Image: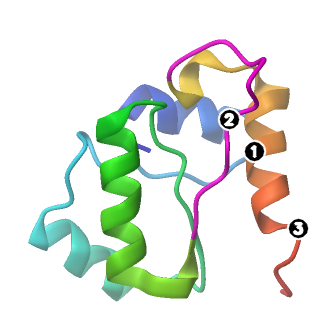
């Protein structure tokens, strides 16, 4: 997530989330994410160039542990907070369906 409202919206939809508070990843944020050590990241950024850029950065940093779900074309909204809870869960579930827990 880029923004805190995106993270809150996802959390309310039952999706664990943290926000970058912007469209860049600082060294400190990278270190914290590495220390937390999640097996996988679902990167749900805004539907714009900045969102795509930070998703690409995270994919470079964390390689195959990162998946970036797609927005459906018919969905309105530029970021996860603009979507319905059902749409947010759909994005998350579609990106994690092939993972083995």
Q: Are marks 1 and 2 in contact (CB under 8 Å)?
A: yes
Magenta segment includes 74: yes
The span shown in magenta is 67-78
Query: Circle 2 — which element?
Result: loop
Which SS type dominates the magenta stretch?
Answer: loop
Q: Nearer the viewer, residue 96 or 75?
A: 75
Observer able to see residue 81: yes
Residue at 58% over, 15% down: 77
Separation of marks 2 and 3 at Cα, in angstroms = 16 Å
> Residue 91: which numbered mark, if any?
1
* Position of the N terminus by quadrant: top left
Residue at 25% over, 43% down: 23
> Residue 82: which numbered mark, if any?
none
Magenta segment includes 38: no
Which residue bears the numbered disc 3?
Answer: 97
Compare marks 3 and 1 and give the one earlier in the sequence.
1
Residue at 11% over, 72% down: 27
């Amino acid at each position: 997530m880029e923004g805190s409202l995106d993270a809150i919206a996802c959390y309310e939809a039952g999706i664990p989330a943290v926000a970058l508070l912007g469209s860049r990843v600082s060294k400190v944020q990278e270190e914290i994410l590495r220390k937390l050590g999640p097996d996988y990241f679902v990167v749900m950024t805004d539907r714009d160039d900045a969102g795509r850029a930070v998703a690409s950065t995270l994919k470079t940093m964390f390689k195959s542990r990162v998946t970036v779900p797609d927005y459906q074309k018919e969905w309105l909204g530029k970021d996860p907070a603009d979507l319905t809870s059902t749409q947010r869960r759909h994005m998350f579930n579609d990106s994690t369906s092939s993972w083995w827990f």
